[in-house]
Image: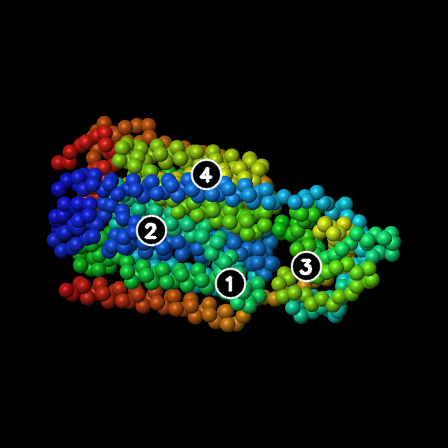
């Protein structure tokens, strides 16, 4: 199948059998990103995936803004609330790892919709819980849905090509993460509407949970009905028709976990996204207790942290792509390390501030930095592996949640550290955990401190090395290698033979 | 066609979005600075009043109407009585314009719950969040049969009354328990808030989600088989 089109800015691309609304590369991935389009299949996939992820985030963090009511209804203690917070982010550690492999095998459309539809019951059953154990359990199971993050990144990496993949990943994830902030505004509003209709407080919050549950269910339907796994079609159809070779699960997984870069991104992501999740769980309480604000004000501040995701994470992805254009992969790595370190500094600083206004100012700047780092991380992830893209995405995503669990366990459980000390220590840990980024090295592009290998390793060598010489299904890796030549940056121009 | 040529053409679209995000960023930042400095200044008011500075000149008793061990929210009643202590000065209550009677948490219900913590500064104190009644002060001894509100949480309680002057500041108090808040306490069992209809709705919606997932799976398999035959 040949890509015939010349792919002008406004034109369409025609292949032997298909027509795309956007210009595409050799793998039929879009080379542009048009935010306000819903063109099939690329932009439509984008809008479906970010919206589904947004709904999952809303559901997972639907409890924190209503905690003042829930804790009285269920007679929760601070320990129960802390445990539920840890439970809400720990479920998806495992789910994210599995999701990576599921995407590699079944395609992001089915994998994500299956997860979303099977965790929706946890949200519905929140309406019926009667005890602290019930609360911890529903938060645990609802939290599994955060694994749709992996499918979002996988889907975007399958639909968008190198120069725009950072932006696509960043915007999709950012607008999904937005759900964590939006829910702090949505749930209280839904709650007060239901109260106005005559329900008591202790019934109104229960009814309110049907809203995120319904949205989650409907978004999954939309993905199944209108989405498509790849530009060329769906996984299942393509498997059967022989266009896409089925891969060996064991090989895919072992190839993924043996790539050291995946572990470094997992650790670093644990201290940017993990920090973001931790803050989502504790920041309202922090402002409420330390500065004696009322709940609504504390809630608005908590929401503004999450709402910065609207531009901050996409900004990180776009910045990564900009750096790549000029400096190639080395630019992406430097930008990532610098912004993450600065984010850690700001976090450490935040815990030391005594004034309310300055705390809010620093928190807002810090939120932009920490969310941009998440976008910068996923500017690098698509290039680590082609064969095991799902596994690497899953590991990194899971690493984010592990970071959140560890941080909350070490610094925010019980009263070993005051909240402000905990925040400072979290910042310091973030700086330490971003140092390994300096060790990421791509033989074809270089690393932060070293240039490309003197042996003149090409992109083809790197990606085809993931397959043994006996394995035949290398076509997609071949095409990807060709399109990722742009990661060399503007300075070098190696003509492809 | 060289892929790099296609890629270079794509650069055209990114800057517009980037400028927009920068502009939104600056606007949001400036707006939030304004809003929050306003909030801080409006958080002022009298922060000096402390509980230990109040006169314990009121005598308050609170007895459940039925001597059952645990009161049910929304059903059972408590008889609350308050008057000026006989040991207080005769004109001690001249400054009282209002009396505010509140339901307060006993220490046992405050354990591991920092949102119910007792602080000496009155504006910070979270011991007595539930108001029973607030009315203009009457020098004669008062009595009230109060039904425990529907939204009172499960816990152990006592009753406290504050005498409030014309400026809205607390000047005196009295409580149905002792100083250590260990005696004359009563327990409340909250309503569950749950309803059978809610449980049924949860089950129905959950079944709907899972079943539709299975339906989709089956449809996908059939579609794939069809395409294979073509």
Neighbour class for label 2 at 10 Å: few (<14), some, many (≥20)? many
Tell me the quarter of the picture where residue A257 sits. Answer: top left
| Residue at position x 50%, y 69% in the image | B198
Apparent side of residue B157 relative to residue A87 in the rendered image (left or right): right
Q: Which residue is mark 2?
A: A152
Distance (Cα) linking label 3 and label 1: 23 Å
Q: Do the residues at pointers 4 and 3 share their chain?
A: no
Q: Which residue is mark 1?
A: A193
Name above or below for residue A464 compared with residue A176: above
Q: Do the residues at pointers 3 and 2 share their chain?
A: no
Helix, strand or loop at disc 2?
Answer: helix
Helix, strand or loop at disc 4?
Answer: helix
Q: Which residue is mark 3?
A: B131
Distance (Cα) linking label 3 and label 2: 49 Å
Helix, strand or loop at disc 1?
Answer: helix
Neighbour class for label 3 at 10 Å: few (<14), some, many (≥20)? some
Q: Along the polypeptide, which appears first: circle 1 or circle 2? A: 2
Residue B92's x, y, as percent? 83, 52
Residue B145's x, y, as percent? 74, 68
Q: Chain of mark 4?
A: A
Q: Chain of mark 1?
A: A
Residue A191's x, y, as percent? 51, 61
Q: Chain of mark 2?
A: A
């Amino acid at each position: 199948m040949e890509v015939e089109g010349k792919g002008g800015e406004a034109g369409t691309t025609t292949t032997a059998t298909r027509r795309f609304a956007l210009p595409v590369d050799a793998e039929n991935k879009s080379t542009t990103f048009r935010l306000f389009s819903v063109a099939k299949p690329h932009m439509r996939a984008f809008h479906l995936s970010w919206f589904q992820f947004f709904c999952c985030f809303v559901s997972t963090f639907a409890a924190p803004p209503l905690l003042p009511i829930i804790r009285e209804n269920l007679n929760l203690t601070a320990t129960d609330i802390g445990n539920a917070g840890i439970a809400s982010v720990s479920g998806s550690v495992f789910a994210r790892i599995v999701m990576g492999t599921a995407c590699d095998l079944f395609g992001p459309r089915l994998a994500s919709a299956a997860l979303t539809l099977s965790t929706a019951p946890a949200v519905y059953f929140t309406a019926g819980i009667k005890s602290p154990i019930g609360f911890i359990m529903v938060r645990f199971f609802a939290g599994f849905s955060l694994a749709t993050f992996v499918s979002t990144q996988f889907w975007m990496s399958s639909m968008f090509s190198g120069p725009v993949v950072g932006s696509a990943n960043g915007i999709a994830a950012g607008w999904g993460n937005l759900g964590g902030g939006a829910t702090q505004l949505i749930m209280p509003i839904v709650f007060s509407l239901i109260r106005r209709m005559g329900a008591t407080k202790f019934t109104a919050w229960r009814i309110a949970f049907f809203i995120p549950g319904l949205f989650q269910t409907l978004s999954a339907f939309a993905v199944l009905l209108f989405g498509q796994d790849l530009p060329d079609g769906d996984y299942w159809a393509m498997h059967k028709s022989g266009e896409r070779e089925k891969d060996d699960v064991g090989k895919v997984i072992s190839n993924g976990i043996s790539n050291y870069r995946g572990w470094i991104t997992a650790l670093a992501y644990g201290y940017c996204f993990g920090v973001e999740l931790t803050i989502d769980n504790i920041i309202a309480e922090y402002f409420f207790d330390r500065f004696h604000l009322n709940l609504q004000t504390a809630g608005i501040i908590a929401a503004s942290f999450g709402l910065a995701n609207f531009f901050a994470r996409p900004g990180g992805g776009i910045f990564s792509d900009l750096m790549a254009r000029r400096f190639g992969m080395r630019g992406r790595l430097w930008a990532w390390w610098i912004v993450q370190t600065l984010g850690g500094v700001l976090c450490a600083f935040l815990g030391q501030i005594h004034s309310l206004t300055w705390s809010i100012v620093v928190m807002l700047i810090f939120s932009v930095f920490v969310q941009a780092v998440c976008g910068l991380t996923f500017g690098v992830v698509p290039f680590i592996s082609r064969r095991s893209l799902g596994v690497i995405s899953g590991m990194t995503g899971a690493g984010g949640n592990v970071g959140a669990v560890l941080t909350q366990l070490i610094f925010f459980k019980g009263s070993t550290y005051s909240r402000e000390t905990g925040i400072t220590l979290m910042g310091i840990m973030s700086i330490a955990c971003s140092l390994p980024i300096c060790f990421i090295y791509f033989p074809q592009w270089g690393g932060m401190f070293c240039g490309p290998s003197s042996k003149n390793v090409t992109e083809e060598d790197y990606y085809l090395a993931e397959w043994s010489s006996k394995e035949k299904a290398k076509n997609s890796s071949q095409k990807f290698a060709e399109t990722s030549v742009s990661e060399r940056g503007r300075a070098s121009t190696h003509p492809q033979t | 066609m060289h892929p790099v040529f296609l890629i270079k053409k794509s650069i055209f679209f990114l800057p517009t979005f980037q400028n927009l995000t920068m502009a939104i960023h600056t606007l949001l930042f400036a707006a939030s600075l304004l809003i929050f400095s306003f909030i801080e200044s409006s958080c002022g008011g009298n922060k000096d009043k402390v509980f230990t500075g109040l006169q314990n000149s009121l005598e308050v008793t609170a007895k459940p109407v039925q001597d059952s061990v645990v009161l049910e929210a929304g059903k059972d009643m408590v008889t609350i009585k308050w008057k000026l202590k006989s040991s207080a000065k005769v004109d001690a209550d001249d400054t009282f314009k209002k009396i505010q009677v509140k339901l307060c948490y006993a220490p046992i219900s405050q354990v591991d719950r920092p949102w119910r913590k007792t602080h000496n500064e009155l504006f910070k104190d979270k011991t007595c969040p539930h108001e029973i009644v607030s009315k203009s002060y009457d020098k004669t001894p008062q009595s009230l049969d109060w039904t425990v509100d529907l939204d009172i949480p499960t816990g152990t309680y006592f009753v406290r009354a504050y005498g409030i002057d014309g400026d809205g500041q607390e000047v005196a108090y009295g409580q149905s328990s002792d100083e250590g808040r260990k005696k004359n306490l009563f327990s409340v069992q909250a309503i569950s808030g749950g309803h059978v209809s809610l449980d049924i709705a949860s089950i129905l919606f959950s079944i709907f989600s899972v079943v539709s997932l299975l339906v989709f799976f089956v449809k996908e398999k059939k579609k794939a088989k069809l395409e294979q035959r073509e």
